[in-house]
Amino acid sequence: MFELPVVIIISIIALIVAGLLARSVLSQDEGTPKMKEVADAIRVGAEAFIKRQYSTIAILAIVLAVIIFCVYFVTGQQQFAVDTSLAYLFGAFCSALAGVIGMSVAVRSNVRTAAAAQKSAAKALETSFRGGAISGLIIVSMSLLGVSLTYYALGANPQVTPFIIVGYGFGASFVALFAQLGGGIYTKAADVGADLVGKVEAGIPEDDVRNPAVIADLVGDNVGDCAGRGADLFESTAAENIGAMILGVALFPVFGVNGILFPIVMCAFGLLASIIGILTVRGTEHGDPMVSMNRGYYITAIISAILLYVAVNWLLQGILWFYLAGLVGIVLSVLFLMVTLYYTDHHYRPVQEIADASETGAATNIITGFSVALETTAIPAILIGAALLIAYECGTMTGIAYGGIYGTAVATIGMLSVCAYVLAMDAFGPIADNAGGIVEMSQAPEDVRKRMDALDAAGNTTKALTKGYAIGSAALAVFLLFNAYMSDISRLIGKTFDTVNIASIPVFVGGLLGAMLIFLFAGFAIRAVSKTAQYVINEVRIQFKDPAIMAGTKKPDYARVIDITTLGALKNMVLPGILAVAFPIFIGVTMKYEALGGFLLVGTITGILLALILNNGGGAWDNAKKYIESGAHGGKGSEAHKAAVIGDTLGDPFKDTAGPSLHVLIKLLATLSLVLAPLFI
């Protein structure tokens, strides 16, 4: 098999490029002693949280590995018990490692970005973006290496091994859920506490050195947006590749092993395209940072389209219809970013409407913001539906049995091909945000702060864009994984299972409970932020009673707030996480595989729509506040600004906790169902 060595070699090349970028970034100046002091506090806090979080996740992962082993053993599939359990643990380990590495680079890039901003805006952009690129390249290359090595280690039997390595995808999903959930609770509890007491009650600026929660807030950017989102997209890459490989088994008589390995080969080609796109990003002193990053993204997409043609000719007999299906996925990724930009950028109507509504108070800000959030489901749903229909039709036009479903798999892989570049944009956001906080807290000159304000604003935009990409790719992925589930059930029962009868009472009930789980999980996640934020708010209020802290002559107890936030986040992430794992098992065991199919189908659709509402609504509220802070509607300190802060605070757990966690949840439900399928027969 020449295909696997190609994937492994490209992944190693990407790791080497990431290493060279890391050496370049870490060799740069760390700035003033005050900058180093703030950065060290952020790094220590982030590493302490991650250590405690992953210790908790490790215990839960080992317990679940034992359950997986027992399920296969008692259902008469002893030959798969050890392999699937080990693949699960390996996937969990790789997912955790990728997230930790990405965060470790980010907490060291932030101070160097702040230092670079003392010299030029261009240098600051290049430093922060390359810091983010290190995370993107490491996460995607490790995902590809993990899938490839697991496939090889478990026998590389093209008609059997894809069904075993799904354990790897489930391990990645399991860790991603808790990483995103715990990190999201932490970052938003700290953010809400810092904003409500600092901005609204005390009337002090964002990232003011007197605010005891400000370091915890900056730590949260790393554990939520870097480690959490890194684990999310690591899991996306692994799960989507494995799902597509399972569907490729049905086309084995046509393409042989090539159809099964096509997904990971194309993702490796996308990694090459992302490397080229990353290296084209150059900053300018007075230009918009988004122009440079968007140009790099379009270059990545164009090169991915060219390499897609190469992959189809090499592995899929040059069938043009499959190439067109892949193009659908690439185009969908571009369109999703454009739609997200429209709904979350202050240059466009939705955010401006929310800012206008802030003139009459917090209530109208919230009403308008929620109406925008609901509106944001329309265009993305149409785009996802159109992409699936067109890709399916392209596959059907090949005349190959199961070609339609495989066409949707090719489209999913097409969208995934730009993942490394999107991750670079995502990790850029918290690096820029942290650098802005470091500049503010170190009391750097005004010109340095202005440079970082522009970069921070771009970071807010990229974080919103990557959430849009994440839910778009998740939507295609779960359809892929749902079909993989049906293929696995067909293999287990010895007959075709290709229809889920929604008119069947158990199936209807399963679907109803699937939708319910999505709302219940989101409710638990948002409540977890509220509970943890209350701990933070109470502590900040206590410290603000000290006149010396408010006068700036005494340093707040930052470590105390970090510890409170850490304990609160870890405590409150367990219930929604266990609910997400236990409930689908209960449905499958009690109502069997077809009812679980209805549960997955309806739960997936509900999860996609609710994630769009939460992500885009929260992003719109956030940027409406930023727009007012730029000087609109009276600027900082105005009544409109106070109303916008309230709206932004409401949107915080939407866009950074519940919404991103739903991306992972809907994929975890599918991978869990695949791994434990023997239990549901």
Image (spheres, rainbow, N blue to C red):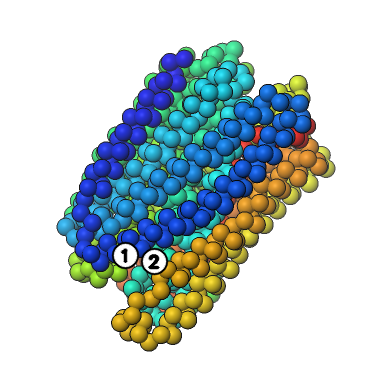
Q: Do the residues labelled 2 and 1 touch (CB within 8 Å)?
A: yes
Residue at 77% from the left image edge and 31% from the top image edge: 74
| Residue at x 38% of width, y 32% of height | 271
Q: Name the residue under label 1.
A: 38
* Label 2 sits on residue: 215
Label 2 element class: helix
Figure quadrant of the C terminus: top right
Left-right relation of 70 to 341:
right
As displayed, is residue 434 above or below residue 250?
below
N-terminal-most mark, 2 or 1? 1
Residue that extends furthest to the bottom in the rendered view of this protein: 547
Amino acid on which the number 2 mark rests in the picture: Ile
Q: How crowded is mark 2: few (under 14 residues within 10 Å), some or many (20 or more)?
A: many
Residue 630 visible at all? yes
Amino acid beneath label 1: Val
Q: In the picture provided, is 247 more to the left or to the right than 100?
A: right
Q: Position of residue 64 (x, y in %)?
A: 65, 42
How far across and how far down the image is residue 540, in percent?
46, 77
Q: Where is residue 571, by image quadrant?
A: bottom right
Quick one: label 1, few (<14), some, or many (20+) residues within 10 Å?
A: many
Q: Nearer the viewer, residue 65 or 362?
A: 65
Q: Does dot 1 land on a helix, a strand or a loop?
A: helix
Whether residue 273 sits left or right of residue 679 in the image: it is left
Q: Decide which of 580, 637 is in the foreground and name it.
A: 580
Q: Can residue 305 be seen in this view?
A: no
- Residue drawn at x 42%, y 65% is 217
What x and y, as percent, mark residue 292?
A: 27, 46
Q: Distance between the residues labelled 2 and 1?
A: 8 Å
Q: Looking at the image, which is closer to me, 460 or 232?
A: 232
Q: Position of residue 396 (x, y in %)?
A: 58, 22
Residue drawn at x 39%, y 62% as measured from the top left? 218
